[in-house]
Amino acid sequence: MKGEFIKKLNRKQLNAFIILVAVAAAMLITTHYPWYYFILFAGLLYLILSVKLEISSKGAWPWIWTVVLYVLGPVFSIFCIQYTILEPEDFVRTKQHIWHLNYLCAAVIYLLVLAIAASVRWAWIISHGIFLLAGFVDYFVYQFRGNEVQFSDIQTIGTGLKVAKEYKFSLHDRGALVLMMSILAVMMVWKFRIGFGRKWVRHVVLRAAAVVLMLYCSNYLQHHAFGLATQTWETKGTRVNGFILNFVLNYQDSKIDPPVNYSTDAIRQLEDEYSTSAETETKKETESRSGSDTSSAGSARDRQKRLAQEVNSGKVQPTIITIMDESFADFRKIGDLNTNIEVTPFIDSLQENTTRGFALSSVFGAKTPNSEWEYMTGNSMAFLPSGSVVYEQYLDQQPSSIVSTLKNEGYKAIAMHPYYSTGWRRNTVYPRLGFDEMYFYDGEGTGSIFDGTKILREYITDEEMFEKLIDKYKENMENDPDTPLFIMGITMQNHGGYKDTYDNFTNTVHYQGGYYPDADQYLSCIHATDSAVETLINYFSSVDKPVEIIFFGDHYPSLDNGFFRSLNGKGTSGLTLAGLEDLFSVPFFIWHNYDTEEKTIDRTSLNYLSTMALEDANIDLPPYNQFLADMMEAVPAINSRGYMDANGSFAHTDSATGEAAGWIEKYNDLEYNGMFDEDNKSSVFFPYLDTEGETEAETAAGQ
């Protein structure tokens, strides 16, 4: 190794020094990083530019330096990414084995570029540049979208670039430090000239060594990393999995293979069957409605009968309100819940004109949008990768759902969520689903209706959410009474965690089976929900138009495992499949202010609820919902964990037998066709909106 100091920088070196120091000074002004970093940067940069280094081509020196660069390079790149994206308190929470797996992911890229370029310096600089760019893109995307870059974003990069100019990007002091360190590292690597003597050594031996090491790292990752779940909530992906590994896992999840026996011929056969079935069903319903009569009466019971006759005759379409209540669960499903007062006395009392029971969710403790998606589309997480989130990864098209079904029936569709619009990308998902109006806490979408005057802990209460929902109903009745209304409301009041204390909150419910403060707080929250539901139901009980309300929880809350253990004896692990499914069984009810049959359903699943709601509202079932209605007879419940057969037994979907196996196979085929087979997507099962029913929301979704 030979080196010498240059007494005076040449013009190119001096220009580079001036430009790079100016960049550092600009970042000092905008980010206010510590001033002594600037002095240190300028001094080290001048020192590096002043040094002329050359690695001898003789002996082992070129190989030693190459090994040093390619051992430390991935470490440096990972540090830069993680340090840029994460807050300091989160940066140190990433576990050691995750760092190890991220290192191997980064090493694969470094070695791949080295194998292609056969240049130690250029390959190192390009590799680090790729990771540095990825880290800053993720950071800036998070600033204006509220969640991290996903592999699916590559498909919509054009749209992203169009809207990027509307946002203001700001760099933080950590980002400035990372940029300055990267500049110094790149200049250092560039100054070291490595010679391997004969060209064949560099072109053959170096490339071969890079390929062998790359294959080894890839094989290790295949066996030790790809079983981890992708994380997509805010910056949790980078904190829990590391940015590089999480992106790789997200790529793995994006590759959805067709079902084993999938064929377009099978889809066409189902089309023929359910096109005929839907026509017959519609004819029967028309005939059954034609004999209905209407009568006006003053009593509540007479009003219920009259509204039922109007709905059954097809003269009036009911207002349909869906409420997915955050973390709403009933722990009596898994054990003896002994509390000082009843937790949900009003909801428990609902019987008249009500269908109620438990529905299998596919998530536990988090990933709310998967429950939302299962309800609205009728699809199931049973056929998608564990840990995936549809809103984040697979919803790039215009999916058929209860939204499009009702809009094709002339409904106006409104979405309401008293939290930030960027959460789970709802600001981009809801237009694709076809909602006409969207209301969020931050005022994005159609506008702001939540004023935050009623806060429980740190979230807008269900009471305020339901008040705004009633306001939208009244507004629609006043301004456009002939247009039926569909409202999809997603609450926030009961969101975890449950261990902090608040000046505006006092526990009213106390569990008697042990001291679990988080459980007391959670139970007190849903006790408040019960009161809000009572006010909501009481209001709509008195209106003189038919109304249907669908209410369900999205998932169980994540609480102290000791609390679960006190109820079921085991906690959340070591359970049979049936015991595990209890932890995924959320309560639901479908209530009407008109006369309907009272029913109790021991177990269904969220993907069936919208079909049940359409049936109760006397809406003609589209072919896909008719398929689901038929499937319910053989497979009453299904989720990401397994399914329940007609005898009430649980099993995993991949071990299904008999009639259930046939229905699950058809279901898998249809879901794949609607979500992923764009070239052969069935217009019978997945029509989205009628051409004449296309709205601004659909147009926006296609932009």
Image (cartoon, rainbow, N blue to C red):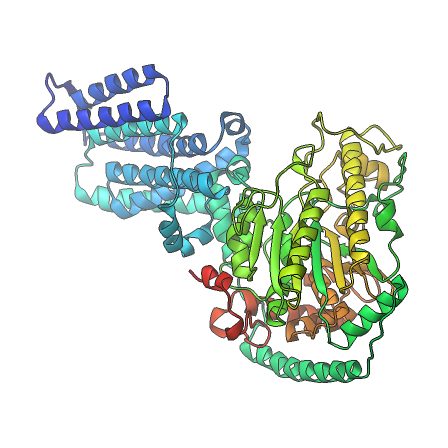
Q: Quadrant of residue 504?
A: top right
Q: Quadrant of residue 420?
A: top right
- What is the number of callouts on the image? 0
Q: Let me know if residue 497 appears in the view.
A: yes
Which quarter of the image is occupied by the N terminus?
Answer: top left
Q: Quadrant of residue 65?
A: top left
Judging depth in this view, the residue of 126 and 442 nearest the camera is: 442
The residue depicted at 46 percent of the width and 53 percent of the height is 152
Judging depth in this view, the residue of 319 and 264 nearest the camera is: 319
Which quarter of the image is occupied by the C terminus?
Answer: bottom left
The residue depicted at 67 percent of the width and 61 percent of the height is 477
Q: Let me know if residue 668 appears in the view.
A: no
Left or right, 439 with respect to 64, comes to: right
Left or right, 692 with respect to 276, comes to: left
Picture coordinates of residue 545 (x, y %)? 76, 64
Picture coordinates of residue 415 (x, y %)? 61, 54
Judging depth in this view, the residue of 157 and 72 nearest the camera is: 157
Compared with 497, 272 (above or below) is below
Picture coordinates of residue 517 (x, y %)? 78, 29
The residue depicted at 87 percent of the width and 43 percent of the height is 335
Picture coordinates of residue 641 (x, y %)? 70, 54
